[in-house]
Image (cartoon, rainbow, N blue to C red):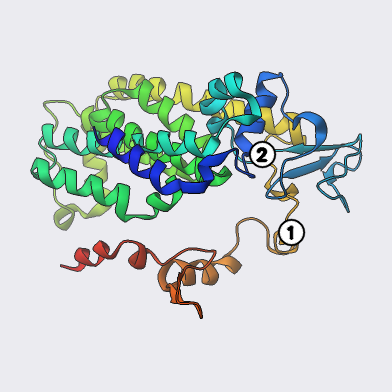
Amino acid sequence: AIAVVSSGIYVAVTGPRLSGPTIDNHYVHLAESFLAGRLDVIGGQPHGSNDWACYDTDTHDICEGVGFTRVRGNEHWYVSFPPFPALVILPAVAIWGQGIHDALFWALLAGLAPAAVYLLLRRLRALGRSARPPLDDLLLTALFGLGTVFFFVAVQGTVWFAAQVVACILLPLYLLASLNGAHPFWAGLALGALFLCRPTTAPFGIFFVVEALRAARRPDALAVPTALTTGVVGRLGAFLSGVDRRRALVTFALFALPVLVAIGAAMWMNETRFESPFEFGHRYLMIRWRGRIETWGLLSFHYLSRNLAVMLGSTPWISPHGYVTIGRHGLALWATTPALFLVFF
């Protein structure tokens, strides 16, 4: 019921974007390439002009001085974003091809994210690890689906938003499988798929490690002393000394298998496309801020002030025509979700 209601709301709010394929339907083109047994864009020419990677196999570097409508034999266009969302939409692309209304597909799929969040909250309650009543779980689910930036993400239908929709479905399912280390293979499969949506989700693997170690403690293990009496290091050592190592290793092996397969698939794609297993292709994006990437790299302290300014200080304003206007970088977290102020109370 949560999935159906959520999808209905997202579809209704998506509006005119439902009328046809979006201009930035990168994953549709990647799925089409997969169906044709290749990794580059079919026809050698990308659709639209937003965030496509171009690699020159002669210079082994980014294409220079090439427009989106020009194609040369040594230049190949790619979707640099991780590929799992293309696998999700692939069956629909196999049926409808490039004509698929991708914004509709992603809006319908997005309804599964609040449903997965509710499943996680309900499971925590069933395990006795949450004291919230069912109504609170529903309210938190509604807050996530309609009172966070996910609402904005769900109704866009374009490339990086589509990846975040899929990741927001997978993440609560991963956490659900990780509770008590109960389903290591499924947890690993979900984390591997998450990595192939948004690599920045990889640190969530720590959650499974902690849960699995806690569940693997022997029944006769001594109680873990408080940090006040032994310190943090001593407490950690006492905790680990009570773990059944054989059980933990088997659990971690089942968890690691699908994760390693996912990482291996990503490295194979990177090597095949860009001649390096560690290169996703973002440095070959044909974008106007290429100069920043060449100067500062993809990950740098240089970007922190601007990102913090958006995350904490970006607010809407009233345009001269009387419209409430939102900047292209979005809103501060507290403006998107005022309920966060409740954390202070």
Q: Which of the 4 image quarters holds residue 125?
A: top left
Residue at which label 2 appears: 278
Q: Which of the 4 image quarters holds residue 133?
A: top left
Q: Name the residue at 58% across, 43% down.
A: 159
The one of 45 and 64 positioned closer to us in this rendering: 45
Q: Quadrant of the C terminus?
A: bottom left
Compared across the picture, whether 230 is left or right of 95 comes to left
Counting other residues with Cα less than 10 Å from the Cα at mark 2, is it few (<14), some (14-19), or many (20 or more)? Answer: few
Q: Pinpoint residue 339: horizontal percent, then vertical percent.
A: 24, 62
Q: Amino acid at mark 1?
A: Arg
Q: Is residue 289 above or below residue 193?
A: below
Q: Pinpoint residue 212: horizontal percent, then vertical percent.
A: 28, 30
Q: Is residue 29 above or below residue 140?
A: above
Q: Name the residue at 64% across, 44% down.
A: 23
The one of 70 and 274 positioned closer to us in this rendering: 70
Compared across the picture, whether 250 is left or right of 216 comes to right
Q: Name the residue at 58% across, 38% down.
A: 20
Residue at which label 1 appears: 290
Compared across the picture, whether 215 is left or right of 64 comes to left
Q: Is residue 264 above or below residue 57?
A: above
Compared across the picture, whether 131 is left or right of 42 comes to left
Q: Amino acid at mark 2?
A: Phe
Identify the element where label 2 is drawn.
loop
